[in-house]
Amino acid sequence: MNTSGQETKPLLEVKGLSKVFPSTVALSEVDFTLYPGDVHVLVGENGAGKSTLIKLITGVHHKDGGVILLEGKPIEPRSPRHAQELGISTVYQEVNLIPTMSVAENIFLGRQPMRFGMINMRAINQQAKQLLRGFGLDIDVTRNLSSYSVAIQQIIAIVRGVDLSAKVLILDEPTSSLDRHEVERLFSVIRSLKQRGIGIILITHFLDQVFEIADRITVLRNGHKVGEHRLAELTKVQLITEMLGKELTAALDNKQVTAREDGASTKPFLEVRGFARHGMIEPFNLVIRQGEIVGLAGLLGSGRTEIAHLIFGIDQNDQGEAFVKGEQVNLSSPRKAIQYGFGLCPEDRKVEGIIGELSVRENIILALQARMGWFNYLSRQKQDELATQMIEALHIVTPDAEKPVKELSGGNQQKVILARWLVSNPEFLILDEPTRGIDVGAHAEIIQIIKRLAQEGKAMMIISSELAEIVDYSDRVVVLRDRKKLGELEGNEINESTIMQAIAAN
Amino acid sequence: MELESKDAYSGQDAGQKSRNGGFRITRPKGGDSRALWTLVALLVILLSGRLISPNFFEIRMVNDRLVGSLINILDSSAPYVLLAVGMTLVIAVKGIDLSVGAVMAICAAAAVVLIRNYENGATAFYFQPGFVILITIVIGAVCGLFNGVLVAFLDLQPIIATLILMVAGRGVAQLITGGQSPTFTNDAFAFIGRGVVFGIPFPILIAVAVLIAAIILVRRTALGLLIESVGVNDRASYYAGIQARMIKLSVYMLSGMCAAIAGMIVAGEVKSADPHKAGLFFELDAILAVVIGGTALTGGRFYLAMSALGVLIIQSLLVGLYVSSLHPTTNLVVKAFVVLAVLLIQSPEFRRFITKPFRRTS
């Protein structure tokens, strides 16, 4: 839907683009067309191939198949710099400019107007000011970039990118850390770029924003293109089903609800009221009962992980209160949360979960040892016992307990982190994407363990992008979108279709 | 702490629980072959010393004190071993402590000023030599606290944070002594640096005692595990409930305390405190010793005894150079080359590279 209204030739055309990495096919024969003056949004869950596509277009990676045409001519971008010279600029979520230089210097970095062999600062400042005014931004360009908000920095990065005579502008999740007002501001810049006939590729996880700014939407999943739509012909439910790869009609099997025999399930373990943190998640209430599995459903960036971080004390709430077994508590750090009987298997296993160089044994006893304190050292015999027990109970595949945990496969690393919590006997476990990136066998085993733990009366909160999984084990499902809790589904209501419709609900 | 009911998760029976009853799996040593090669390097250096000077290995008893090159090596190693103990722990949490030399100067200055008060007839209990020692160690701990707060709580880069005290520390020492290098005569305090017990110089005994105490502290408690965990991945450690900041803070404090003892040894040896020279550049040899000992600057696994071995290598080299007929001006260059050689011989890649031409014949 180009704004000029007449038939236009595509600005950027990608045909049959493929990329193979040693272990996976990251992108498989993807077609993608960008018209001048269009905002073309790329959506898809983690690993869908969005960033691979961008990296091929910008020359970070090199394609294994297919063609990229810019204004009808084939191009072979060698590096991001080369791509920029060709007219393709990229602005990332983390602004990659120099925070300690002035706004004007940043805009003209590497191409400063010179006079008498010196940088002509006056010229730079004047030109920069003019340039920014053109985008409705009237700021002091002599101040350091770092003295401005992320939104302004992003606009500056965009202006710089566009001023480098860009024809195509790629925005990689620019709105992730912006608030509503800042997003508006960014969008107005985007709209003025459209007027100039620049083609914009936008990656975002925020559905509402997709429907606000997009002209055209391409959905990727597992490296394949699953759909391309004009905004007008697409509904939210359709988009979500495509992103998650489910057929609405095929997913109507309701959950088999098995009544629990014990009455304990009604006793709340954790209750939070009006919990929120500015810029992370809007206020929500949540009750988690003993022996209950609560699933958090929503797309990437919907606030799932943010809820886990707030409850586990990694980030602190700036509103609301929390109660454990009816008593008000202050969840100010993971250590506090652990003392109340919480445990967390984090989303990013490598960065937040495992202690790579340490052995399986040491990783398993770590949380328990941290709780017992420095001087109450578990005897080596006890450590070996616990490690061996867990290796057997969770079928952790490792030659022995002394193997550095980083040498294990993803699934086994996940089991080690589960084991770490199980030996410290928690009452409430938060699992953030417990089955991501692990092989099928381990996958089934981990689901088994989760169900067994619930039967033992542990309360659990599980985040997963796999809807089928959530439907399978959840007693209750909390639905999230765009950093907001939309509602809850319970018992018979839980099936993939109702969840997707709930996510899409207005 | 509840530890029972673990078997409940296993679908199968856990009757094999005691299978490993008395069986101990040894601690995974990243430096097993490394330890061997480091020892080889030390022996080579000592034997070279023996070649240069025939009585290099000779140890005699003179006035109830053992003398000889080997004793000199141990004696001059003592303050470095103390620093290396603290430095190893700091490096294990991905830090570095450049300030230890300056902290030595501060502590030496403070101790000597206090002991001079005692000599001049001050009667307050805290001027007693015993209390002076205690106070000095507390001063070292406070210096470490300063570093630790900057690194652990204000998130400054360790190299910058400790550089502050490295520079400022000598100024503080000068302020304490009023710009002088005060001397003292009290033999009780000087015993720390020049005393002899059963013929063995007292500093050696202090260093050995502190080394053993440190090893017990970190390996018989959970501290060692927690330090390594924080060093490898402080974020994941924090998520597992470890007080990562407190661990970092405490290792910097331990490092400061070690530097305080080293400062008193140096002051005791010469019965004075020179704010400019006491402990000057000691931090660099301490860091070098830790690296030779195999503790990586990237943090994680650490080896206290190996760091001490690293100190011995450096000091054997210096004593060897001292007895050699080489002109002293060549010392630093020779030291640099030998250290390089030691680091290369420890590297499996380098050994493979060197032995490759000989293996190709097969």
Image (cartoon, rainbow, N blue to C red):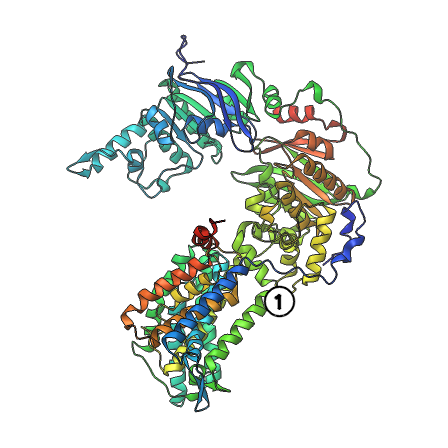
At 42% from the left and 29% from the top, the residue drawn is: A186
Label 1: element kind: loop
* Residue A13 point in image, percent of width and height: 43, 17
The residue identified by callout 1 is B220
- Amino acid type of the residue that numbered disc 1 sits on in the rendered structure: Arg
Q: Residue furthest right?
A: A261
Q: How many numbered discs sit on the rendered protein? A: 1
Q: For residue A284, which quarter of the picture? A: top right
* Subunit that carries the residue with mark 1: B
The front one of A456 and B90 is B90
Farthest residue, direction top? A6
Q: Does A352 sit left or right of B91 as displayed?
A: right
Nearest to the observer: residue A13 or residue A133: A13
Residue B311 seen in render? no
State which quadrant residue A296 falls in.
top right
The residue drawn where x is 39% and y is 24% is: A76
